[in-house]
Amino acid sequence: MTTRRPVVEFDHHTADFGEKATDVYADLRSRCPVSWTESYGGHWVTTRYEDIARIARDDETFSSARGENADHGTAIVIPRGPGLVQYPIELDPPDAAPYRDLINPLLTRDAVAGLVPMIARHTDEVIDAFIEDGHVDFVAQLTNPLPTAVTLDWLGFPREDWKRLAGPVHDIFAAAPGSARAARGGAALGWMEQRIRELLADRRREPANDVLGYLVAQQHPDGRPFDDDELVSVVFLLVAGGVDTTTSLTGSTLVHLSTNPEDRERLRTEPGLLEVATEEFLRVFAPSQSMARTATADTRIGGCPVSRGDRVLIPWVAANFDPDVFDSPDDIRLDRNPREHLSFGIGSHRCAGAHLARAMFRSMITRVLDRLPDFHIDPDLLVRYESCGSQTGWDSVPARFTPGVRIGGNGAASASPLRLSVVGRTQWAEGTVALRLADPRGGMLPAWTPGAHVTLTLPSGRVRRYSLCGDPSDLTAYTVAVLRCADGRGGSREIHDSLGLHDAVTVSLPHNRFPLTEAPWRTFVAGGIGITPIVTMIRQLVAQGDRNWNLVYCGRSRSSMALLEEVGALGGTELYVADEGRRADIPALLATLPAEAAVIVCGPDRLMHAVRDAAGGRPVHSEVFGAGDHVDVLGSDAQPFELELARTGLTLAVPAHRTALAVVRDAVPGIASDCEEGYCGSCEVRVLAGTPEHRDSVLTDAERVASKSMILCVSRCAGGRVVVDL
């Protein structure tokens, strides 16, 4: 293409870029959102979320492979860098598929849940090494050695290798391109290649129950074993992805918590908030700042002409701060829940290790808040990475704290204030079980008010929040109700299937972000399990003799609606049961309310959005726990269909009450997934035949029309059958 390029001065590897990156991208976004720079041989710079996500997902037009200039080094960063080809991130589909399929089963949500005890053990062991000193360099003594220990232990490296590899991996990411430090790191990684080959040979001679042992036992789809060159490449990527990205994220978060003590205190008193806060920290402190692609054909980005062979920078950090996607992006809000952030990428190369990264990060933050609660970082002593263009973070984070006590790495100290036992289990409705939780020593529990919730840390390490729905005057026990989500993230299944009487759970102090609001009239709207916080509010009003309220209670069937008999006896209730053909007309129900009425809603996202849309500017009070807690991935109109897996040779029946992803997972346990709510794209698959019914927020309008792919966690079939490339 010969159309004139919009040229700007831009270099993302300058020494001070890390301090001003978001400002630089914001400036470009406002005046030249797609621009060309002559830096590093010339490349395009993109700044808008929409463009970055499109490029990352379009492997056909924007390649990750080294291509015609393979001898120039990796093409996924600018400038190109030396090193072995890393499978699968430097391959385009379909070439990447065998290697992605190789590692996906190792990094599923359930697989990582099984690693939580090991991660906790390593975290306490690392903290034990310095907790008596009263001072620490968090990078050198925690955020680098912990991910290194976890990743290499998981892979199967002997302990004596851990320290030898921790520094070089960090150097590769922290050093400026072409610097002496980068060269030293590269040389040390040469030893890592040799060591990987030795360990692979050991596993071939003597199998072991670790990741290296798993890898050598697998076969390529063409029927041959993976050779050592392929496996060395895969292991390199697992080490690089597992270590320094988590180092960067954790260091940046600790700096933020030291300089913003109100956020630190909130996480200490509301430990369950860390699950959703993790996503905000990822958005703001994305370890991988940018990646790159190479155009395979003449095309356009945001109207600008891009020629075949042009290099394109896709900065995840620019997407994460796009104000068209994230309101007030410069603000750090612990409960924002920025579901669409691109810190793990998007498309076929979205980070396979996202669950492991989150688990290591949460373990470190939780234990620091618990064991070093008064840590203080001196901003004047902080040292940034030498270059922050591709990877960002802190090279040194010195801190002081009140010396603590070693616990021997057994994780004995609890990150939450209450350790309770299950003293009662009651089936409240089809798919809903109520747990009664009490102090095994018979102690009284902290007080709570209607609308409050607690956070449960389950034996697996999963963290889930539930509304308290018992009697606030009865402090001998807490009651929570748990809806079984067959296609959820595993927390409700663990509670229903594994958590029995007398089992122990860690429970946070009650917290109330959904208090009963004062108003002359209150209209409550509850959907499904959303009745649990609302019923406690109504009980209080009835006890006070206040009848200025009404309740709209919606559910799929009477058998699935918890507390139905009690709610009916309270009066003032309108029931809307879907399988009886009665659905709530939310706009009509709210249209007659006086302007001063309060609308209080809890339930699936679809219901809460409908209430907000119909409120006509009237304030709506709602409880949103975060990712996944109230997201109805099926909807009320889901229909059964058949899903054919072309490569696997299976035809699966997808019933109305299950997602396609859940059904596929039964047959292909290693299927990639992350959000399971239709916004990250991890479970996107190619459609070979049939017409999907798209319910995601990933595909563009054009992609929905073309229907060449579908998102398994939420999308269904517009006909009776769809065939996918699995």
Image (spheres, helix red, strand yellow):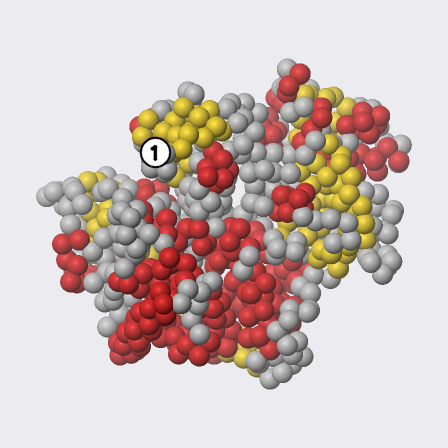
User: Looking at the image, can residue 238 be seen?
Assistant: yes
Residue 694 in percent (x, y) is at 42, 29
Residue 441 percent coordinates (x, y):
85, 61
Residue 53 lies in quadrant: top left
The residue to which callout 1 is attached is 646
Q: Which residue is drawn at the image coordinates 51% and 73% (left, top)?
A: 142
* Residue 94 screen position, x and y as percent: 27, 44
Question: Vertically, is 411 above or below 104?
Answer: below
Q: Is residue 602 visible?
A: no
> The residue under label 1 is which amino acid type?
Ala
- Residue at coordinates 38% horizontally, 72% vertically from top-left? 170
Residue at image location 56% in from the left, 45% down from the top: 489
Question: Looking at the rendering, in which quadrant would you find the N terminus?
Answer: top left
Task: Judge by depth and name the residue closer to the eye, 595 or 161.
Answer: 161
Q: Nearer the viewer, residue 536 or 483?
A: 483
- Image quadrant in which you'd find residue 604: top right
Determine whether the residue tagged by mark 1 lies in a helix, strand or loop: loop
In the figure, is residue 132 to the left or right of 676? right
Q: Is residue 674 above or below residue 380?
A: above
Image side of residue 623 versus residue 247, left or right: right
Residue shown at 58% from the left, 53% from the top: 275
